[in-house]
Amino acid sequence: MNNKTENRAFLEMRKAALNRLEGKAPEPIAARTGIFYDKERKIFTLKSMGYDIEVSYPQFHITPELNEWHQLLLLHYMDMADSAPLTGQLMSFGDLPGGMVRGGGFDRQSERALSQRLGNASPALVKKACEDLGAEIFDSNADLSGVFSVFPYYPITLKLWFADEDIPGSGKLLLDKSANRFLSVEDAVTAGSLLLDALFSSL
């Protein structure tokens, strides 16, 4: 897909997302998404992958100027989220309902990329890169684990094992089992891809 085609696709999807949000009251959106809404300023505010974001109402203008696919994800989340509680149980992207092909493909690609790009990296640098993107580091069976807040009810968990003399490094991205209540499979893959790009570019 060339840049012109990709930009046209983004603009069409953005227009459709804005049309779906048009006329929706802000308070129910805030309740469904966990995004704070300031009635006086008519502004939604949230943190997403290290960004402090504001979304105006009713225009749904997003600042700062994010990557266009990050913008689209946020609009889709504001449209689709249904306030389902997080389960605390993790699953692969391929385990999403209807995600065997697209999600499974992303699982394989992301695991390969994490192994190649982070498996031999400095643990301290990787930890700092995760924290710079807003990740909450926690103890697990992996060498490094972090939860990234893509959106308030949409975390993505990274588990990473660093290489040693005998075993190459490996890693995986995981979703909460409630993820399909907030974004589609396609959006989930986009969210995972954006997170990887941000993580790799910060090292």
Image: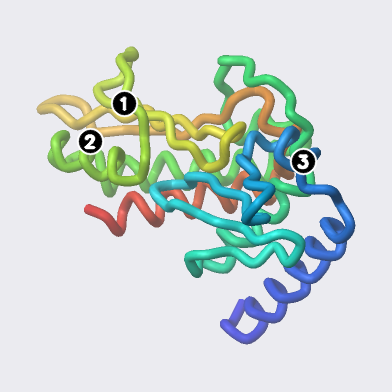
Question: Residue at label 3?
Answer: 27
Q: Is residue 154 above or below residue 18?
A: above
Foreground residue, 168 or 184? Answer: 184
| Left or right position of 46 against 114 | right
Q: 10 Å neighbourhood of mark 3: few (<14), some, or many (≥20)? A: some
Q: Residue placed at 19% from the left, 31% from the top?
A: 163
Viewer-nearest of discs 2 and 3: 3
Residue at disc 1, secondary structure: strand
Q: Residue placed at 72% from the left, 47% from the top?
A: 78
Is residue 73 at all visible to an observer of this figure?
no
Q: Amino acid at mark 1?
A: Ile
**Total numbered badges shown on the rendered structure:** 3
Residue 114 locus on image (x, y percent): 34, 42
Foreground residue, 72 or 167? Answer: 72
Tell me whether the residue at label 2 lies in contact with that at label 1, contact meaning CB atoms closer than 8 angstroms: yes
Residue 32 locus on image (x, y percent): 75, 34
Is residue 44 at all visible to an observer of this figure?
yes
Residue placed furthest toward the front: 40
Tell me whether the residue at label 2 lies in contact with that at label 3, contact meaning CB atoms closer than 8 angstroms: no
Q: Amino acid at mark 2?
A: Lys
Q: CA distance from mark 2 to mark 3?
A: 36 Å
Question: Residue at label 2?
Answer: 127
